[in-house]
Image (cartoon, rainbow, N blue to C red):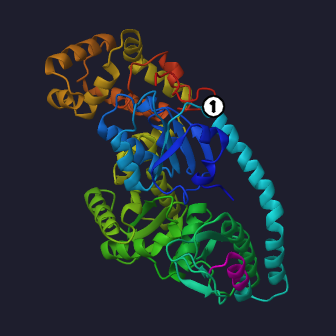
Amino acid sequence: MLPTVTEVLTLPAIRAAAPEVLAGDPDRAVVRWVHSSEVYEMGGLLAGGELLLTTGLGLHGRTTAQVADYVEQLADAGCAALALEVGRSFAVVPQELIQTARRRGMVLLALREVVPFVRMVEDFHDLLLRRKLSWRRAGEPIWQELLGLVVSGQGLAAVLNATARLADCPVELVDVDGRVVERSRTPGLVDSAARTVAEVRGAHGPVGRLVLNGRSTAGRTSVAERAAVAVALELGRHPDLGSRPSLAQAVITDLVAGVLVSQGDLQARLAAAGWLPPAGTHVLVAAVEVDRRTPASEAVPAVREAAEAVLGRCLVGAAGSTVVVLARGWPRSSQGRQRDAAEQLRARLRAGALDAAVRTIGVADPVSELADVSGAVARAREVITLSRRIGSRQAVVLAQDVAVHRLLAGGLDGAQVAAFVTGQLGPLVDHDAAHGTDLLRTLDAHVATGLSKTRTAEVLGIRRQTLYARLNRIEHLLGAPVDDPGQRTCLGLALSAWRMRTGLDPQTVPGPTRGSIAGQLSGAAPGSPGTPGRAAGWTA
């Protein structure tokens, strides 16, 4: 049972920092861990549920759009709350920070007093230890009562009725497609504005959700967690209950797990689920990423409806924070049609009930053999992960959009990649570090604009004469003209590898580099233990 932001704010170290809530609902945001970092690209390094502490050093000198994008990336990663210590980098909290946090529903705190962040982390750690011990002691009577109902064979309705009584609110069990399987018949206080939800997991993955129709409290969360286990045990005793995963969900679950790779087995399972593409038809696999606060299983019905309106009959199921869609598609050569279809799907989802909960749609290359579908499912989800890793804000990402990054993230030897990048970019990085110049950023922008001097100058916000001087210096240091076809290919690949290895975008690094490029490519992640608040080899 994890604490809410409101509970965390009562900790001595955090209370001493005089926190002020500027956005979000601290009563509903649940904190899994407290972390501190000054890295701008922190969104791609979070796992969700964090309270992130920062002095704003990584935001200093950023544009309004970059500050807003910082919050967008944190919200995409499922960050529970952002706490900004004012008085160091910012005298007041930037309005774009507040507005974006409010729009995304993320808690934003202003810390008015200076308190070492390490004390806040330590206080939170102590809270978790105390909570775990009290959870065990207080939960035993609840668990014993619910388990007793299962052992005595009184049935699912009895378990739900007892849960409703213990939680003092109506309870219902829904399957993975959102259909209600059973409701409690014990009256309770109804709070239609809030719910407490616990996932019910069976032997092969999620089988449904237990929904307590009342505001989330420590007591209700404790009851929900134990009741979800009791319901899972009860369902295991009666496999004929309608709460088992749908055939479509079972297929998606096994494809994601990589246990359904045989052509014959998959063909039989797809036929049983009522979705078997004719021989010779390509299968298009898309993964729809939803906000971490929205269970993917709840998004399945809306995604299915939108996908079938665009792509025809589909097979749809939840997998982690994504909804996987299998559809009849087109050959790989029809990328334009694939992108158009994905854009239409996203537009329908954003216009419906899911709206802002839809983050990114990743699309794998179509496959013509059923035996390749499992790999395509993995690639569609990987496309989303890679787009996050390189800081992309694209709403629709095809496998070809991140093809180079997939190659670099694969089995290539790290030392060889580092040596390649050093050979290509090392002179620029060293020059930037020694002279405070912006050559690496200039080269990155020039390559990204297709070597257009006019567009590069516009992107960087500099005069063309300044750009010419920088390009001359770059070519002198590299010993080759940038517009040479072979050189351009190598530089583009090196810049992609640099992003993958450092987790940084040259266009958002706020200052000149420091240290050798070998150190930057050593594999240390930004904000990693031992260098809190800094990316390896970079000024904050």
Viewer-side residue, 408 vs 99: 99
201 with respect to 58 (left or right): right
Three-letter amino acid code at the position of disc 1: Pro
* Residue toward you, 474 or 461: 461
Q: Is residue 164 magenta?
A: yes
Q: Tell me: 317 left or right of 162.
A: left
**As drawn, 441 above or below 337:** above
Q: Is residue 141 left or right of residue 109?
A: right
Residue 217 drawn in magenta: no
Q: Quadrant of the N terminus?
A: bottom right
Q: Which residue is mark 1?
A: 529
Task: Return the x and y of residue 185 as percentages of the image width and height.
Answer: 65, 90
**Is residue 238 or residue 25 the one in the foreground?**
25
Residue found 39% across the figure and 68% down from its top: 354
Query: What is the chief secondary structure element of the magenta stretch?
Result: helix
Number of marks drawn: 1
User: Is residue 264 among the parts visible in the rendering?
Assistant: no
Residue 415: give x, y in percent of width and height.
55, 25
Q: Quadrant of residue 440?
A: top left
User: Which range of residues does the magenta coloring cover?
Assistant: 160-169
Instruction: Tell me what residue is drawn at x 51 percent, y 25 percent.
Output: 521
- Rendered location of residue 404, percent (x, y): 40, 40
Mark 1 lies on a secondary structure that is loop
Foreground residue, 209 or 108?
108
Q: Position of residue 41 (x, y in %)?
A: 45, 37
Q: Report crowding for label 1: few under 14, some 14 to 19, many 20 or more residues within 10 A (C-alpha).
A: few
421, above or below 366, in the image: above
Residue 324 seen in this snapshot:
yes
Q: Is residue 458 left or right of residue 405?
A: left
Residue depicted at 58% across the width and 79% down the height: 175
On screen, residue 366 above or below 186: above
